[in-house]
Amino acid sequence: MQTNDGIVLLAKKPGVTSFSSLNNVKKSLHTTKVGHTGTLDSFAQGLLVVCTGRMTKLVSHITEFDKSYSAVIKFGAETDTLEFTGQVVKDAPLPTLQALKAALTQFTGELLQAPPAYSAIHVDGQRASDLARKGIQVAIPKRKITVFSADLAEYQLEKDSDRVVFARVDFTVSKGTYIRCLARDIAKSCGSAGHLVGLLRTKVGNFKLSDAAGLSLLEDFSIASAKKNAEDFLIKQTVEAEKEVETNAKVRKPYVPTEEDLLIQTEIQEKIQNFSEETSILCGFENIHLKSEERLADFKNGKKLFYSDFEENINPACAKPLAVFYKELFCGLLEIGANKKLYYKFVIA
């Protein structure tokens, strides 16, 4: 595997965009060919799974993986964006702890979720978020999601009361699930209103935040740290807006890496990983193995391949893409044509 062909696990800090977080990957691996498998909002933090070089061909498959999050919900108010940067559109009483626990039990399994107005979903060729900022209300169809688990990890009560002000809930969900919508719906279910003040992504498929470059730069995630990050985020937004008004333009500054950047870039080089057989199975591929170095050379050079070149007995009726490995090295993908012959999809090795 070339040094810039791989999968990078990156710990995104709160307060920066997913796009800008990729700069360290580009600088570290000297490539502009990078693709993330699911963004995080600027205020959110945690795991970004980034494919680099020729591995970007796998982005669409990894995007489909289930994901795990820890989310801090503030009760008593709902905002238009369903997170703390938005405008309050609804006030409601705080829920009791008993009501919150009961509501969480209703939010596992298959659900129909109404996506947020402020989202990247396209409606009539335009992003829903762009329409929402213009004050245009659109009907976004509900979508089927699966919540595999919703566990109360931490809560903060109102003083001298059993009413919940903040709660940290750990979720494992299917692709396409909006955690801020879960916050909205859970709050509504327990007779309140709510929005997100913090979000940490901890897992994508078999990829874990604990293995990510830059993890040491993230604080322990809690209600207290989420509240502090939210306050800092709003202050930073205000300062940047004032600076932009003063200059009336965004001035591009020359790139000067910080100590944190250099640490992350070093860890990226150390931790970049190949595409594993476990990940391949999650992608829905059938794993097969080349018999010898000679067959590996044939594969690299795009030569015609036969079923007998592989260790496994390949089923000619297999409809799955065939993930080709030589020992533990991922080499690329094949597919079986209608004539039962093997055809190349792409080559990595």
Image (cartoon, grey):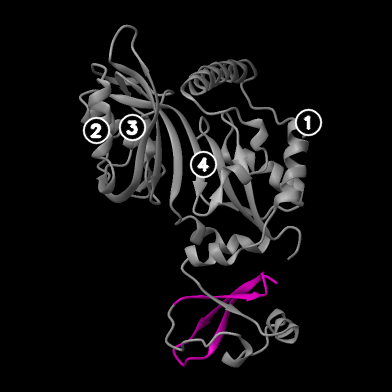
Identity of the residue furthest to the top in this view: 160
Residue 324 magenta: yes
The residue nearer to you, when weighing 126 against 342, is 342
Residue 222 coordinates in the image, percent (x, y): 49, 25
| Residue on which the image places disc 1 | 259
Q: Count of labels shown?
A: 4
> On residue 103, which mark appears?
2
| Residue on which the image places disc 4 | 202
The nearer-to-camera label among 2 and 1 is: 2
Q: Earlier in the sequence, mark 1 or mark 4?
A: 4
Assign a secondary structure to mark 2.
helix
Assign a secondary structure to mark 4.
strand
Residue 46 to residue 279: above or below = above
Q: Is residue 99 left or right of residue 32?
A: left
Q: Amino acid at mark 2?
A: Ala
Residue 124 coordinates in the image, percent (x, y): 32, 49
| Residue on which the image places disc 3 | 183
**Residue stretch in magenta:** 320-349
Q: CA gap, disc 1 to disc 4?
A: 25 Å
Q: Is residue 117 visible?
A: no
Q: CA gap, disc 3 to disc 2?
A: 11 Å
Q: CA gap, disc 4 to disc 2?
A: 23 Å
Residue 41 to residue 249: above or below = below
The nearer-to-camera label among 3 and 2 is: 2
Q: Main secondary structure of the magenta part?
A: strand
